[in-house]
Image (cartoon, rainbow, N blue to C red):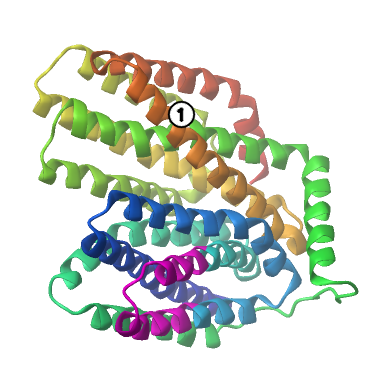
Amino acid sequence: MKNISTLLLVASQFFSVIGSSLGQFLILLYILDHSHSATSFGTSMAVISLGRLLALPFGGVLADRFNQKKSMLLLDTCYLFLTIVLIFFMDISTHYGGLFLIIFVLGMLSAFETPVVQAVLPKLAQGDSLIKVNSMISAIGHLGIILAPVMGGSFYGVFTMKINLFICCTLFVFALSCEALLKIESENVKQQQSSVIQMDRNDLKEAANYLSAKKIILQVTLCATVLNLLIGSMIQTLIPYIARVYLGVGNIEYSILNINFGLGSLLGAIIYGAWSKKLARKNLWFLLFLSGICMMVVSYALMQRLSPTNSFWIMNGAISLTLIMFSMISVHLMSYVQVKSQPELIGRVMSFVFFLSMLMTPVGQSLYGWLAETINAQSLYILVLIVGIITILLSILIKPLMKKIRMSV
């Protein structure tokens, strides 16, 4: 029964993630296409991120406090309802204020959904099976990043916006159908003895106290946060800037680079899931060490003043390898947190981890953006080199921590 429920959960996540990713891509493209304004486009992306950031601390409370199957059904029902509202909204308004409000709520829903799903996983799988399922869920998230632009770009030029949104509705209906069939172990849900605000405050305080007591989990959380700040933000911000502005690559090459961002992360999750028994018992510090080496390869290619084409393909290959290894490390860390956290606190703990990582994303993006503007374009290789060196030193520093995780998972 658990195997069937696991498959249903994976299927529901596939339909839900593709539906929400496709919907957000279509809305952003619609705003850009009709406003022709970089400000409106940038604001819309910031609104989605703000919704996620504000909701993440409370997503864990939802996952731990309420029935998780009903929570999943409620969230995808909200996705479906908002998409239907969007279909009618296209007829009655041309203002973007309403769209911003809807995508803000969509961002909040995505933040609520993540910890709920993470809290369900330990109830459907344990040990090596949990790691494999976690890898599959992570792979689906990366697959959504890849498929949404491909599907959205293809559909947008062929179908009307209403038909495209109707396709999203169909995906959410499939997700709801899978979730309705899910069989999850009964939960001992705490009784509500105070106001919702007081309950949230108490639950978040309980999770914070738990993390303070569990030093190893807190260290893993901080490790994931630093990695996201150091490597994730650099790849999202600095590498596209170097490719487009410094190397001056064309649209095709730039598209390939962005697709490889998703493919690298997807392959990393798949590889870790396929060899989880072996990898879970190894000290994966060397993957971070190799990531630092890849950064130094990128720096060397830029320093040697190779042709833009050669520099681009060397950078593209090195960054793709970095993303594969970075994704494997991320799945490893998240699996450890799930395995070692108390079942009744998993949602809040995972929510805290995702909140910290997401909080550092705009900080890292702003920092790398400022550095790229400040440093002479010809000297960008120095910045990449420094990141590579720091990554190597960090890999050596966290080697004992990764050893403890290897022994515990």
Q: 144 and 356: which one is in front?
A: 356
Placement of 260 over or under 78, stated as above or below: above
Residue 293: percent from left, percent from top: 36, 21
Q: Residue at x 51, y 48 (%)?
A: 331
Q: 67 and 58: which one is in front?
A: 58
The residue most toward the right is 193
Query: Where on the picture, by quarter, is residue 401?
Result: top right
Q: How many marks?
A: 1
**In terms of secondary structure, what is the magenta stretch mainly?**
helix
Magenta-colored stretch includes residue 91:
yes
Q: Residue at x 34, y 55 (%)?
A: 40
**Is residue 335 rendered to the left or right of residue 143?**
right
Does the image show residue 7? yes
Residue type, numbered disc 1? Leu
Does the image show residue 127? no
* Mark 1 Cα-neighbour bin, 10 Å: few <14, some 14–19, many ≥20: some
Identify residue for label 1: 367
Q: Residue at x 49, y 50 (%)?
A: 276
Q: Residue at x 84, y 73 (%)?
A: 190
Q: 151 and 127: which one is in front?
A: 151
Residue 192: percent from left, percent from top: 85, 75
Q: Identify the magenta region.
A: 79-107
Residue 169: percent from left, percent from top: 37, 83
Query: Where on the picture, by quarter, is residue 211?
Result: top right
**Is residue 179 rendered to the left or right of residue 384?**
right
